[in-house]
Structures are given as C-alpha cells and as structure tokens.
Image (spheres, rainbow, N blue to C red):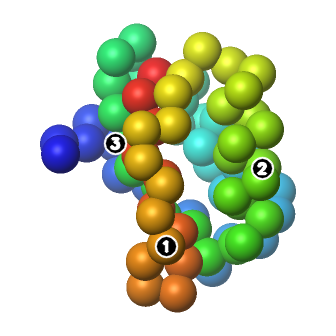
C-alpha cells in the first residue's frame, strides 16, 4: 500500500503520538493515507477514541517491531 505521509512516533509517550497524528492529518487532504509507527501502548486506545470523533478511517492496525503500526485514511 502507498502512503501519502509516514510518521515515526516511536519512542514518544502519551499524548505525543496522538498530537503528532492530529498535526499530520491537519496537513493532509481528504482521501490521503498516513502510516504512523508508535511504541506507546496507549496509542492503541487513544487513536481508536480519536478516530471515532473525526472524519478519518482506521484501515489497518498491526503490532510490529515492539510497537504498533496504524494506517489511516483521512
């Protein structure tokens, strides 16, 4: 899958991964896809809650390399 934006938030703790995601989405156009890498387990809950409140869709969430990978379409 091709990503329009790739964001590395590994090593950051709550709330920074979520803030970085919000900043990334604000710079994107509708239909674009962002891939976010995190290591903070709280990002699983935070991203799910946030995405339920905004007009963006979680396409994929996987555990990889001692962290998490989120693919989100704005």
Q: Report how many numbered discs are placed on residues in the image.
A: 3
Residue 56, image quadrant: top right
Query: In 3D space, how far apart are the residues under numbered discs 2 and 1 (Cα atoms)?
Result: 15 Å
Q: Position of residue 24 (x, y in %)?
A: 52, 37
- Please state, as top left, top right, bottom left or bottom right, where the N terminus lies in the image: top left
Tell us which disc is closer to us: 2 or 3: 2
Report the residue at 43% width, 85% height from top: 65
Query: Which of 64/20 is in front?
Result: 64
Query: In 3D space, how far apart are the residues under numbered discs 2 and 3 (Cα atoms)?
Result: 20 Å
Residue topped by disc 2: 46
Label 2 CA crowd tier, 10 Å (few <14, some 14–19, many 20+)? some
Report the residue at 52% width, 87% height from top: 66
Query: In 3D space, how far apart are the residues under numbered discs 3 and 1 (Cα atoms)?
Result: 19 Å
Report the residue at 76% width, 22% height from top: 53
Residue topped by disc 3: 5
Q: Looking at the picture, does residue 23 appear above or below residue 9? A: above
Report the residue at 46% width, 22% height from top: 74
**Number of the label disc, if any, that sits on residue 63:** 1
Q: Is residue 27 visible?
A: no
Q: Are marks 3 and 1 in contact (CB under 8 Å)?
A: no
């Amino acid at each position: 899958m091709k990503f329009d934006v790739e964001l590395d938030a590994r090593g950051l703790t709550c709330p920074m991964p979520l803030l970085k995601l919000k900043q990334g989405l604000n710079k994107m156009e509708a239909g674009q896809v962002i891939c976010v890498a995190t290591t903070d387990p709280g990002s699983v809950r935070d991203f799910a809650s946030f995405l339920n409140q905004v007009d963006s869709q979680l396409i994929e969430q996987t555990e990889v390399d001692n962290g998490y990978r989120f693919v989100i379409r704005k």
